[in-house]
Amino acid sequence: MHLPKRRPITYIWARRIAISIVGGTVLLLGVAMLVLPGPGLLVIPLGLAILGVEYAWARLWLRRVKTRTSDVIDVIRRNSPFGRNNDRH
């Protein structure tokens, strides 16, 4: 029976640092795009997803963003004049 090789601590820390830098940069770019031209509302969840690979707090925030986004989409669909189950003719 083979046991998985243990990775050196330096690899683990290098991976965590790389994920933190890339995820943090994407997240900050998304926040900046809220006031600058660009798809900030799409980039922020991407940054949280990258950070969520290493950090539980990012997974929690991503789950909250998904829930709130779903709620907003439901409200828009209910109030849309083009909705599927709309009986206003």
Image: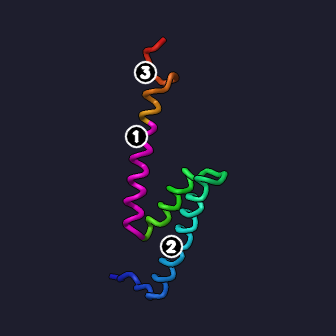
* Residue underneath mark 3: 85
Q: Is residue 10 above or below residue 32?
A: below
Label 2 neighbour load within 10 Å: few <14, some 14-19, many 20+? some
State the SS at label 3.
Answer: loop
Residue 60, horizontal then vertical, whole percent: 37, 59
Q: Is residue 67 above or below residue 26?
A: above
Label 3 neighbour load within 10 Å: few <14, some 14-19, many 20+? few
Mark 1–mark 3 distance (CA, rounded to whole Å): 17 Å
State the SS at label 1.
Answer: helix
Can residue 60 be found in the magenta stretch? yes
Which is more toward the observer, 48 or 4? 48
Residue type at mark 3? Asn
* Residue extending farthest right: 37
The magenta segment: 55-73
Residue type at mark 2? Ser
- C-beta proximity under 8 Å, tags 3 and 2: no
State the SS at label 2.
Answer: helix
* Residue underneath mark 1: 71
Can residue 89 be found in the magenta stretch? no
* Residue underneath mark 2: 20
Q: Is residue 55 above or below residue 10?
A: above
Quarter-of-image position of residue 5: bottom left
Residue type at mark 1? Asp
Which is more toward the observer, 51 or 12? 51
